[in-house]
Image (cartoon, rainbow, N blue to C red):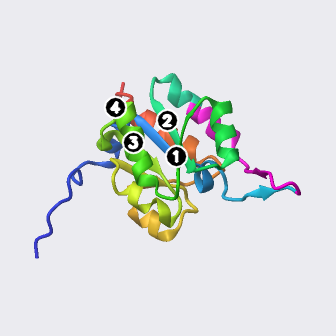
Amino acid sequence: MMIPKAPGSEMTLEERMAGVTLLALEMEGVLSDGYLFTNGQGAQAVRTCRADELGLEAWRQEGLKVVLLARQGFAPARAWAEAAGIDLREHQGKKQPALQVAALEFGAPPAQVCYVGSDLDDLPALTMVGLAAAPADAHPWVRDACHLVLGRPGGSGAVRELVERILDARRPLA
């Protein structure tokens, strides 16, 4: 039986990485380790990795765009994005429409978007991008759906690892 190729399936991983101009990240499980801390007054906090922030600074220094996706009203994501100077797009549980709008706003066709997700609700967004990536500790179905599974877990340097790999792929060999 002959199985038709999906559009873009003939691209190598390096070609996919080299074409990325917009990096879209999920907060919970990608930039954070997925743990949520709640104090006695109900305020929530997450833990992020400084190495990931440094990786995103290097990304932006290259003139590339980044957007953070987080559930609507998630104060830790809003505070983190504001402190980092990164655009935030809130969603009500459906990430794909928020990602589509962000890609249009940034002028990035789907083939130039990298989305990093870690859980089942990320699957629709992962299927629409040119480079789908997941941290090492992502749900097994998510890992199976991605072009690239990182060696580091979410909230522990996975974003920096991804940024370094993409930036290396974008640089011509000397």
Q: The residue tagged with tag 1: helix, strand or loop?
A: strand
| Kind of residue sitting beneath label 4 | Gly
What residue appears at the point 62 percent right and 46 percent down from the top-left corner? Answer: 157
Q: What residue sits right under mark 1 in the picture? A: 25
Q: Label 4 vs label 3: CA separation? A: 10 Å
What residue appears at the point 52 percent right and 46 percent down from the top-left corner? Answer: 25
**Residue 60 colored magenta?**
no
Position in image of residue 166 (x %, y %): 43, 38
What residue appears at the point 62 percent right and 40 percent down from the top-left corner? Answer: 52
Q: What residue sits right under mark 3 in the picture? A: 101
First of labels 1, 3 by sequence position = 1
What residue appears at the point 53 percent right and 67 percent down from the top-left corner? Answer: 139
Using residue 72 as the reference point, say whether residue 42 is left or right of it. Answer: right
| Kind of residue sitting beneath label 3 | Val
Q: What residue sits right under mark 4 in the picture? A: 107
Q: The residue tagged with tag 2: helix, strand or loop?
A: strand
Residues in magenta?
A: 40-56
Residue at the farthest bottom position: 1
| Kind of residue sitting beneath label 1 | Leu
Using residue 25 as the reference point, say whether residue 53 is left or right of it. Answer: right
In front of the other: 49 or 174: 49
Q: The residue tagged with tag 4: helix, strand or loop?
A: loop
Q: Label 2 vs label 4: CA separation? A: 12 Å
Position in image of residue 27 (x %, y %): 60, 49
Q: Are marks 4 and 3 in contact (CB under 8 Å)?
A: no
Q: Can residue 8 be seen in this snapshot?
A: yes
Q: How many marks?
A: 4
Q: Are marks 1 and 2 in contact (CB under 8 Å)?
A: yes
Q: Label 1 vs label 2: CA separation? A: 8 Å
Q: What residue sits right under mark 2 in the picture? A: 66
Position in image of residue 84 (x %, y %): 64, 31
